[in-house]
Image: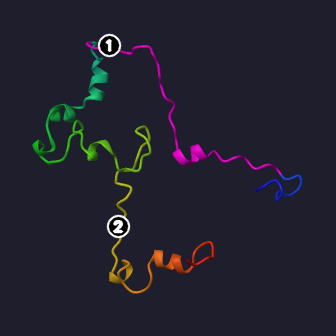
Amino acid sequence: MSEERRPFNAEQPEPIDDNEDRMGAVRELDFDDEDTARIGDEMPEQALRQELPDQREREAGLTGASTADHHGTDDDLQPDTLIREDGARSPDEPGSNRPADQELSLTDQADIGAGHGLDEEELAHLDPLDGKPE
């Protein structure tokens, strides 16, 4: 609201943080100059087991065609491996066990937009939100 329209003695509304609203959760960048490890340093056994589980160790160097299920491994540079589709917005956020965009429903011919009647775009041209038809 502008200053002229706001009622007298009304509280000033909180400003909207457009960047935070647009980007969602943001992690702080870490520019730590201190080396945490050097090349050749051995990892502790527990950390190594957590970083490289048995299945990943068995599949190291294999391509999707080499595995029994013919799917890519964690070491492949495939979009399926690199881009998770579980709805998580960051690597640290847990996602669901199924893709976020696969909620399917059965429809008949009349419900797919190829049936009778106008689709959403055509309805919007007839009755636009600003009330001014094109």
* Mark 1 neighbour density, 10 Å: few (under 14) some (14–19) many (20 or more): few
- Residue at 24% x, 39% y is 77
Which region is colored magenta?
Answer: 11-40
Residue marked by disc 1: 38
In the visual, does 30 lie left or right of 129?
A: left
In the visual, does 129 lie left or right of 72?
A: right
**Mark found first going from the N terminus, 2 or 1:** 1
Q: Quadrant of the N terminus?
A: bottom right
Residue 116 position in % (x across, y down): 39, 87
Asked if residue 111 is among those painted magenta in the image, a careful observer would answer no
Amino acid type indicated by mark 2: Leu
Relative to 37, is 103 above or below?
A: below
For this orientation, the residue located farthest to the bottom is 116
Q: Nearer the viewer, residue 7 or 4?
A: 4
Q: Secondary structure at mark 1?
A: loop
- Residue 106, by quadrant, is bottom left
Residue marked by disc 2: 104
Q: How many marks?
A: 2
Residue 41 position in % (x across, y down): 28, 12
- Residue at 21% x, 39% y is 76
Relative to 20, is 104 above or below?
A: below
